[in-house]
Amino acid sequence: MATNHQLVETILVETLACQDPNSAASKTRLLGRYQPLGPYIPGDHGSYPTTDLAMNALAELADITRENAADINIAVSRDRMRMITSEVFGASLQELSRERDTSQHWPMVKVRLLERARSSTKSIVHYVPVWLFVGQECGPFSIGGVKFIKRRDWLEEIASRRGKQSSWMPDVESLWAGTKLKGGSGLAGAKGALAALRRGEHNFKSLRLAFHNAKRFSEPKDLSNARTVARLVHPDQWVACSLVEGFEPEESRRRGVLAVQVALDTLRLAMVRPARSLISTAVDSVQPLSVDRLNQVAGEDLAHGFRINRPGMSGAPGLAQAIVDGSKDLFEAAGAALLPATNVSAHHQCPKLADRWFNAVHWYGRACLADVDFVAVVMLVIALDILSGGREQKGILELVARLTGIAMSQQVLGDGTTLKKLVERTYKLRSEVAHGSVLAVHAQLDVERGQLEDLATAALDQYAVQLHHYAGVGGIDDRDAFLKSLQAAKL
C-alpha cells in the first residue's frame, strides 16, 4: 500500500505533466475511463487536467485520511471527503509545485485537508414533511432531536431559528389561505413574445409560451420563493424539524432524514394496526395515493375503478394527543438512543445496546410500510433477531418473555397459541418465505404479519424503556448483562 507521501507525489507529478497538452501524460489521459475529455482537479482559477492514476491516488488519500481521523470519519461522508481532497489539492497545486523539498508536500496538504474537512461541519435543521395526524388537534412534541409541528407553525419555527421573519413568508401564508397572487410583469411577457417573433416564431402557440415564460421569470424573487415553499408541504401534513449537529451538509441530510424515520418508527410503537402503516415521511417509498384497476371478463366491457390510500392517522377527537401524552417514557428513552446519530457530541451510556435498538426499530418501521406481506414478515423477524443480539429463535423467545413478563407457555392468541409457539411459528416463516416459490411468498400472510408486528411492537417498546432505565443506573454495555437485568423469563 502506498504511503500518504507517495500518493501526494503521484497526484502532483501526474497533474503537472498534464498541464502540457503535448506531453505523453496529456495524450494518454484521453484514452482513460473519463474519455474523451479526461479527469480534472478543481482549482482556484479553473480546473487542472490530470490522469486516472492521479484520481485513484486522490480517492485513496481521501479515504486513508478520513479513516485515520475519528471525528472526520463520523462527520464527513466518503464522497464529500474525496471532493474536499480534490479541492484542497487543486488550491495548493501552485504552491506545491514551487516547493522543491518533496518531504514537505504531504504535511502541507494534510494541515489544509484536515482543516477544510473539519470546517465543513455545520449545525443544520432539516425540515421533512411527514404524514402524521390528520384532522386531529395535537400540540408539538419531540423525540430526541426531532420535533414534530403542524404546518401552520412551521414558518414561525423558521423565523425563530433565523432570528427574524423572512420577506417571502407573508406570500406563503396568503397562498396557504387560498389567495391568488399576481404573477410577473405583463410588459416582460410582451417583450418575451416580441423576442420570439423576431426569432421567426410566428405561430400563436409559440408566442403564447414565450409570453408566459417571460412573465413567469420576471416574477419577484420573494414571490417565486413563496410559491416553491408553499407547495412543498401538503395542508394535511406535519413538518418534522430534525436538528443535526456537527456533520457536513450531505451527511447531515442523510442523518436528518434517517432520524425522522426512526422517530416515526418510535411513534408506531404507540399505535395499533393499521395506523402504523399510515404515517411516513414524504420521501418514503409507500403505497401510492391512488390505485387504478383495469380489467375485463370475457364477453363483458372494460371495467375500471380506483382505490384511495389516504395517508395520515385520523380517529376520534383527542386520539393523537392521547397517544403523545401516553408515550412520554417511550419518547424519552427512544430520544436518548436516537440523539447520538444526529449529534457528534452526544453519547449514549450503552452505545452498543442503543445502536441495536436503533437498527431494529428501523427494520420494524420499514416492515410496517411494506406493501407485501412476505417482505414485512422477513423484516420483522430481522428486527427481533437484531434486538436479541443474533440469538435467533431461542434468544427472541427469552428476550420477549423477559421484556413483557409473559410466560412462554401462556396463551397469547384466541386459538390457544402460546408465546413459545407464536415465536416458533413466526420465526419459521422467514425460512419458508426465503425458500418458497414466487406464488408461495406472495400468498396472503396478513394474519401472520399482524401477529408478528404486534409481537415486535411489544418487544421494541419495552426494550427502549428498560434500556433507558438500565443505562441510567450505570448498567454495562453488554447484551447478556442487560438480559440478566430484566425480570426472569417465566416458563
Image (tube, rainbow, N blue to C red):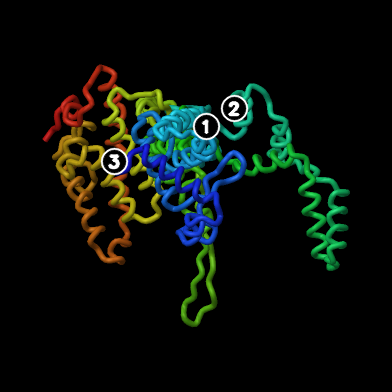
Q: CA distance from mark 1 to mark 2?
A: 9 Å
Residue at image coords 30%, 51%: 377
Secondary structure under tag 3 reads helix
Near mark 1 (Cα within 10 A), the count class, few <14, some 14-19 or many ≥20, is many
Which amino acid lies under the numbered mark 3 shown in the image of this protein? Answer: Ala
Question: Which part of the image, by quadrant, shows the N terminus?
Answer: top left
Secondary structure under tag 2 reads helix
Camera-nearest residue between 106 and 165: 106
Residue at image coords 51%, 51%: 18
Q: Position of residue 240 (x, y in %)?
A: 51, 34
Which amino acid lies under the numbered mark 1 shown in the image of this protein? Answer: Cys
Give the answer, above or below, for where 329 lies relative to 385.
above
Q: Which residue is mark 3?
A: 456
Residue 243 visible: no
- The reply, left or right, for residue 95 in relation to residue 185 is left
Q: Which mark identifies residue 473?
A: none
Residue at image coords 63%, 21%: 163
Q: Which residue is mark 1?
A: 241
Which amino acid lies under the numbered mark 2 shown in the image of this protein? Answer: Glu
Camera-nearest residue between 8 and 431: 8
Q: Which residue is mark 2?
A: 157
- The reply, left or right, for residue 411 in relation to residue 131 is left
Q: CA distance from mark 3 to mark 2?
A: 35 Å
Give the answer, above or below, for where 158 lies relative to 210.
above
Of tags 3 and 2, which is closer to the observer? 2
Earlier-in-chain disc, 3 versus 2: 2
Q: Position of residue 403 (x, y in %)?
A: 23, 31
Earlier-in-chain disc, 3 versus 1: 1
Q: Residue furthest bottom?
A: 299
Q: Are marks 1 and 2 in contact (CB under 8 Å)?
A: yes
